[in-house]
Image (cartoon, grey):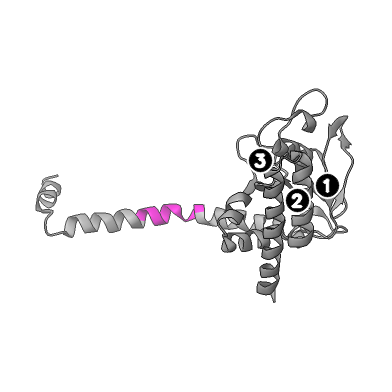
């Protein structure tokens, strides 16, 4: 049963986070700590059986120091030092000429590679699911606060994340990147949003009519009715 599988993954994930917090308290090296945590979390709790360590990738003469990939080279996983955040530029994530943040590195790689659409970045306390996205003004990612989920025992939030972040959502290694469930959900969301926007005018007009009728018919609004009657 899916419910039982999520419950089992929840217990595994809690144990992984406990180890992460113990390592932070003991002063363990932050990058190695996040790597160990993410490897266990993704492999044992989120079903990433294909997760493997990777050497830095070179695309367009730029170096991308990505530590893990899943489904062959379909899903990049960028690791930041534990607790550092995903938007802080770091030398170790740079290309030798400039620094990059963990999410900046992921986004740059997703945009540059024609074999990837979706990927992950995490510093242990936060995880983001990112998508190929050339726009700088309209970010394309979903973020989960792992620290809060585990410290406050937010099981429903974990279950929602599990359903979104399981390896199966990123498709299969031999298929095209566009065929994954995440991409299908995104397209469905875009179509539903377009339909909803198209109906906004009708809904707004109906709301004005309902409000206006309410104002006119309310027994205490005699002054309003007289003012309308006089033009």
Task: Tell me if label 1 and label 3 are in contact, CB under 8 Å.
Answer: no
**Image height check: is 155 above or below 178?**
below
Would you call the spot at circle 3 few (<14 residues within 10 Å), some (14-19), or many (20 or more)? some
Q: Is residue 89 magenta?
A: no
For marks 2 and 1, give the one nearer the viewer: 2
Taking the image as shown, residue 142 lies to the left or right of residue 50, namely left
Residue 136: x percent and y percent?
Answer: 64, 34
Residue 77 spot, x, y in % from top left: 78, 46
- Residue 184 showing in the rendered view: no
Whichever of labels 2 and 3 marks the residue nearer the N terminus, that label is 2
Q: Are marks 2 and 1 in contact (CB under 8 Å)?
A: yes
Instruction: Name which quarter of the figure residue 5 lies in.
Output: bottom right
Q: From the image, tell me which residue sits under label 3.
A: 83
The residue where tag 2 is placed is 38
- Magenta-highlighted stretch: main secondary structure? helix
Tell me, yes or no, if residue 132 can be seen here. yes
Judged from the image, the secondary structure of the residue bearing numbered disc 1 is strand
**Which residue is denoted by mark 1 in the rendering?**
68
Instruction: Tell me which residue sits at (17%, 59%) in the image.
Output: 217
- Counting residues from the N terminus, which is met first, the one under dot 2 or under dot 1? 2
In the rendered image, the residue lying farthest to the top is 97
Give the residue drawn at x 65%, y 35%.
87
């Amino acid at each position: 049963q899916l419910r039982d599988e999520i419950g089992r993954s929840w217990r595994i994930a809690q144990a992984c986070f406990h180890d992460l917090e113990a390592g932070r308290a003991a002063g363990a090296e932050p990058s190695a700590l996040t790597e160990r945590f993410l490897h266990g979390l993704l492999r044992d709790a989120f079903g990433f059986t294909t997760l493997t360590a990777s050497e830095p990738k070179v695309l367009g003469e730029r170096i991308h120091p990505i530590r893990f990939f899943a489904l062959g080279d379909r899903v990049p996983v960028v690791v930041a030092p534990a607790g550092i955040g995903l938007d802080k530029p770091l030398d170790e994530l740079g290309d030798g000429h400039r620094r990059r943040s963990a999410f900046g590195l992921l986004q740059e790689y997703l945009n540059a590679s024609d074999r990837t659409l979706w990927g992950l970045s995490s510093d242990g306390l936060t995880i983001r699911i990112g998508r190929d996205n050339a726009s700088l003004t309209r970010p394309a990612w979903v973020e989960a606060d792992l620290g809060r989920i585990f410290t406050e025992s937010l099981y429903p939030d974990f279950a929602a994340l599990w359903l979104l972040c399981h390896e199966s959502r990123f498709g299969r290694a031999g298929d095209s990147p566009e065929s994954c469930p995440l991409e299908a959900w995104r397209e469905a969301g875009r179509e539903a949003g377009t339909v909803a926007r198209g109906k906004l005018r009708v809904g707004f007009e109906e709301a004005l009519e309902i409000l206006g009728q309410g104002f006119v018919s309310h027994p205490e609004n005699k002054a309003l009715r007289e003012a309308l009657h006089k033009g």
